[in-house]
DNA sequence: GAATGTGAACTGTTTCACAGCC
DNA sequence: GGCTGTGAAACAGTTCACATTC
């Protein structure tokens, strides 16, 4: 079983590798990958060793083969089906992100309890009634769902999702959810993140060149070619 | 120096503790905190020990004292000043989040390069020209900034922020940023997160009750009782 | 010489197990 | 008995150091 951190880095590697392909680069050294992804060369080599990818003593790693190898692990098929619950401001920002970007994901359905939204197509995705999660996801099965409803509704939404067969949840609401053990869950709590970084900002300010590198580097990342960030719905 | 993970959990504890205060609860046991925050009782006790908070053998921990103790560490004053760069869909969602919620944060300024937005007040915050980051943040100093611009612009924005004295960045764009060591940085790459969870969703579906704990719990709480599903959660 | 591949050491985090307290 | 506090063990993740290959 590949750990969460390795999976994260594979995604980051792939992003940079795609970049290299566009530039017609055929090979890459571990230290180049490292440099671009904000890691050490050793860690890169460990990761590649871990997934059983073999390089070449002279030329480093074949870009195309490595991309294929990572693809085999992540199995992205033609599009990862997702469902979004909660079409508020954040939910809409996410919908927009999908409608413009990455064909890598496929938004199957969205849900909300606002009568104004139910039935409408918002950012390219039809919005259904919250109560319809189970029936609709039974017809259009989805393994992964995104929760962007208010904290008070989150647990009940999660329960429905689990009943609908969802096995992975990205939870943007600031509450801890109780889900069965087989369900993977990732928490993105903006308030928590901002406060955490603010804490270390303050410390950095005081300590200056302190004991250790401070970087929190949650996800590390890389020039994802096609993916423009996404706050900006303007320019590029 | 308190580690990132402990800081995260302190924020989570505080959230539940505030809840307890509302319900007039005066004391709390480590296993209750653990239960609610998706952790183990040992880990809670370790954290409290780590920050030097002492409980009572009979009654557990005093809620009010613990809140005060955590507040002293996080120093939230009357409001953490923040700046937002990139008023696209995500940026607006974040602005709305602040204007409705937590007086804990104070959005000092927002920036964008869209002439349609510059000069306007959006979601309660005046939007300035991207080029004005340094002068405006020099007058209204901010230690922490949020980047929600497209990937192509992210590095140049980060450079300006650093020049303006920012020591902490939350980066929503999917690129690795080069910043001086004293700058704390946290990456939130939606695409990466969705794909990661999708990966483990698939694995969970197949493996069922497999080897190891499942929850990815990027930022915090994890509903966990015991060993469950997949390879390790650690760090983030 | 400049890469990769990898055992071994190290660091950070979590859990175990149990002493001490009420 | 059920709680806290904590040394010690276990574990995961990272880095070091170096043998190996071209």
Image (spheres, coloured by chain):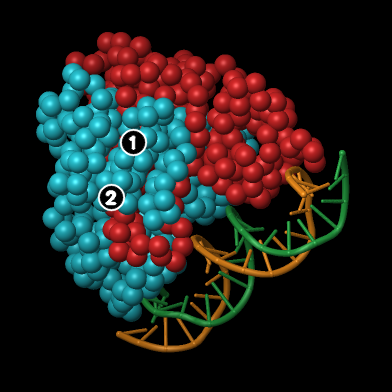
Chain colours: A red, B cyan, C orange, D green
| Secondary structure at numbered mark 2 | loop
> Which residue occupies 36% across, 62% down?
A208
Callouts 1 and 2 close, C-beta under 8 Å: no
| Secondary structure at numbered mark 1 | helix
Q: Position of residue B139 (x, y in %)?
A: 15, 46
> Which residue occupies 21% across, 54% down?
B19
> Which residue occupies 76% across, 35% down?
A59
In the displayed structure, would residue B123 be above or below residue B114?
below
Quadrant for the C terminus of chain A, please: top left
Q: Confirm whether residue B187 shows in the render.
A: yes
The answer to which of marks 1 and 2 sits earlier in the sequence is 1
Picture quadrant where residue B160 is located: top left
Q: Position of residue A138 (x, y in %)?
A: 46, 19
Q: Chain of mark 2?
A: B
> Which residue occupies 50% across, 28% down?
A224
Q: Chain of mark 1?
A: B
Q: In the image, are marks 1 and 2 on the same chain?
A: yes
Image mark for residue B157: 1
Query: As rendered, which of A167 and B111 lies closer to the eye?
Result: B111
């Amino acid at each position: 079983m590949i750990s969460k951190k390795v999976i994260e880095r594979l995604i980051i590697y792939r992003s940079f590798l795609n970049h290299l392909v566009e530039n017609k680069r055929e090979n890459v050294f571990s230290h180049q990958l490292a440099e671009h992804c904000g890691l050490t060369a050793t860690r890169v080599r460990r990761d590649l060793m871990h997934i059983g990818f073999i390089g070449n003593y002279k030329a480093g790693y074949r870009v195309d083969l490595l991309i294929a190898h990572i693809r085999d692990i992540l199995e992205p098929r033609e599009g990862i089906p997702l469902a979004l619950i909660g079409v508020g401001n954040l939910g809409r920002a996410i919908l927009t992100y999908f409608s413009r970007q990455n064909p890598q994901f496929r938004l199957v359905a969205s849900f909300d309890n606002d009568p104004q939204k139910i039935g409408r197509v918002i950012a390219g995705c039809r919005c259904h009634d919250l109560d319809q999660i189970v029936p609709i996801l039974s017809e259009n099965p989805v393994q992964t769902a995104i929760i962007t409803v208010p904290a008070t509704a989150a647990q009940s939404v999660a329960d429905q999702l689990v009943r609908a067969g969802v096995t992975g949840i990205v939870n943007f609401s600031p509450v801890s959810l109780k889900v069965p053990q087989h369900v993977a869950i990732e928490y993105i709590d903006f308030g928590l993140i901002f406060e955490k970084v603010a804490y270390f900002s303050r410390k950095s300010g005081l300590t200056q060149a302190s004991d250790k590198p401070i970087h929190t580097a949650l996800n590390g990342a890389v020039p994802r070619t096609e993916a423009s960030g996404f706050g900006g719905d303007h320019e590029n």
